[in-house]
Image (cartoon, rainbow, N blue to C red):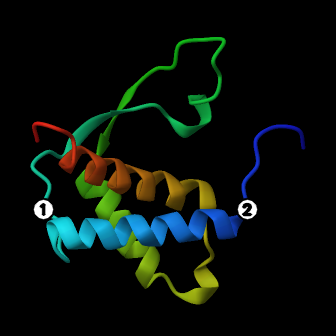
Amino acid sequence: MDGPDISVVELRAPLTLLLDAVEERFGSRLQFDEDFYWNVPLGDATRVQQDPELNLGSVIDDATSVREFLNRAPGDGIFIWHDVDHLVGVLRAIGRLDLPGS
């Protein structure tokens, strides 16, 4: 495969550092003021030859999906595209908490 690459090790360390910083700044439980946000569907995000159709994402839905992922029985599988999409929604909500003027 040609294109950008990064190792899982390189991803794991900054995620841990970021979450440690989030916990230090905002505490161990996060409260979001906004639920809905504009979302580019995952399958459309890299089709740059055409404008994507936006839809509404929901932090409540994302957080629910993350919790369901954590409580999923081991034999139920991991659906990377789906689970990553919801985790990204939560991470973006965390990023919005830290925006200047927020």
The picture quadrant where one finds residue 49 is top right
Tell me which residue sits at (43%, 52%) in the image. Answer: 88
Please tell me how crowded label 2 is: few (under 14), some (14-19), or many (20+) other residues with Cα within 10 Å. Answer: few
Q: Residue furthest bottom?
A: 74
Dot 2 amino acid type:
Ser
The residue tagged 1 is 31
Q: Specify which label sits upstream in the sequence, 2 or 1.
A: 2
Judged from the image, the secondary structure of the residue bearing numbered disc 1 is: loop
Q: Residue furthest top?
A: 50
The residue tagged 2 is 7
Q: How many marks?
A: 2
Tell me: residue 67, above or below residue 56. Answer: below
Q: Percent x, y for residue 99?
A: 21, 41
Tell me which residue sits at (45%, 72%) in the image. Answer: 16
Judged from the image, the secondary structure of the residue bearing numbered disc 2 is: loop
Query: In the rendered view, does 63 fall on the left or right side of 76?
Result: left
Tell me: residue 73, above or below residue 48. Answer: below
Q: Percent x, y for residue 40?
A: 46, 31
| Whether label 2 touches label 1, CB < 8 Å | no
Query: In the rendered view, does 69 fall on the left or right side of 1?
Result: left
Q: Where is the N terminus found, in terms of image quarters?
A: top right
Between the residue at mark 2 and the residue at mark 1, the CA separation in whole angstroms equals: 32 Å
Q: Where is the C terminus found, in terms of image quarters?
A: top left
